[in-house]
Image (cartoon, helix red, strand yellow):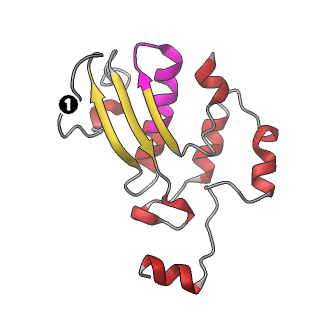
Amino acid sequence: MLFLSISNPNKPEGGYSFDLTRWEERQVAKMQIHLSVVEPGDNWLNKGFVFDRGFNPIPGWDLSVVWLSEEGMPKKGLLSFEMFAGDGVRMLGCCVDLKLRQILTSLVLIEQRDYESEIWRKDMLCEEKILTENEKQQLGR
């Protein structure tokens, strides 16, 4: 029960590599796929899929609607990507869906008290960041 114990849908940003033959990894991958589809923007970076270890990733692979059903998602293979949420400033058109993230959190073993201190420190990437004028100029806004 490692993946469901350490996954935090409220703060999913980072790199992932899932073996789709493993039940827990598959469940967390489904949550990430759901977030990717519902939250706008280019939120999966450096994505790739390979059917088996030792093979090269499928060139130009991208997440398709087929993956949104249990029947369409491959039963085996290695899925890798970096989840990106716009760094709190909607970069690459990304915007988080806090309600969805809270719902997905009910499917994992983490509890709100486990990340409450990050919320109070305003360290969660889910929160919109207020940009200074200097930061806006650096981003070209």
Relative to 23, say whether 131 is above or below.
Answer: below
Q: Position of residue 26 (x, y in %)?
A: 46, 22
Q: Is residue 33 left or right of residue 14?
A: left
Q: Secondary structure at mark 1?
A: loop
Task: Please name the residue shown 58% across and 46% down the image.
Answer: 100
The quadrant in which residue 139 appears is bottom left
- In this view, the residue farthest toward the left is 59
The quadrant in which residue 129 appears is bottom right
Q: Position of residue 121 (x, y in %)?
A: 78, 58
Relative to 72, say whether 15 is above or below.
Answer: below
Which quadrant, please, contains the N terminus?
top right
- Give the extent of the magenta segment: 18-32
Q: Position of residue 99 (x, y in %)?
A: 62, 50
Residue assigned mark 1: 58
Could you tell me what secondary structure mostly forms the magenta stretch?
A: helix
Task: Please name the residue shown 30% across and 35% down the image.
Answer: 48
Q: Nearer the viewer, residue 67 or 43?
A: 43
Q: Position of residue 51 (x, y in %)?
A: 26, 19
Q: Name the amino acid type tagged 1.
A: Ile
